Image: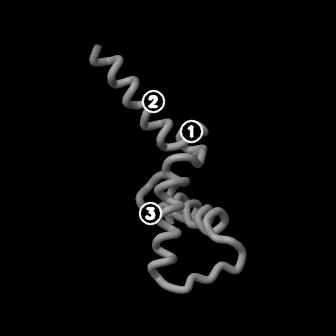
């Protein structure tokens, strides 16, 4: 359908949802309400996936580490 890196490439989305299913939910997980499912997903994304989990696409760093590295390099350039 499309080459890697193009907007029609859904490999990164598939990878994210595979990680979400594997890491956020115990086996045979059933939520009682939609709000419970939303809260669990939100907590996984905001507290683990975006802050702690290492991503190979950004040099085996967490997104928070990469962001801090970016801003440190920008502040040095301004001085």
5 sits to left or right of 25: left
10 sits to left or right of 22: left
Q: Which label sits on residue 15?
A: none
Is 16 drawn above or below residue 79 in the view shown? Answer: below
Q: Which residue is painted at 56% across and 66% down in the image? A: 17
Q: Which residue is situated farthest in the right direction here?
A: 27
Distance of label 1 from label 3 (alpha carbons): 26 Å
Residue 32 in picture, x, y percent from top left: 55, 86
Q: Earlier in the sequence, mark 2 or mark 3?
A: 3
Q: Which residue is situated farthest in the bottom direction here?
A: 32
Front position among marks 2 and 3: 2
Residue 31 in picture, x, y percent from top left: 57, 82
- Of 48 and 14, which appears nearest the observer? 48
Distance of label 1 from label 2 (alpha carbons): 10 Å
Q: Earlier in the sequence, mark 1 or mark 3?
A: 3
Residue 3 in picture, x, y percent from top left: 51, 56
Is 66 drawn above or below residue 41 in the view shown? Answer: above
From the image, tell me which residue sits under label 2.
69
Are the residues at dot 1 and dot 2 in contact (C-beta closer than 8 Å)? Answer: yes
From the image, tell me which residue sits under label 3.
8
From the image, tell me which residue sits under label 1.
61
């Amino acid at each position: 359908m499309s080459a890697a890196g193009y907007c029609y490439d859904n490999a990164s989305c598939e990878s994210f949802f595979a990680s979400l299913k594997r890491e956020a939910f115990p086996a045979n997980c059933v939520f009682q309400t939609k709000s419970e499912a939303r809260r669990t997903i939100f907590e996984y994304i905001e507290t683990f996936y975006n802050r702690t989990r290492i991503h190979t696409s950004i040099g085996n760093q967490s997104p928070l580490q990469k962001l801090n590295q970016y801003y440190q390099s920008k502040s040095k350039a301004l001085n």
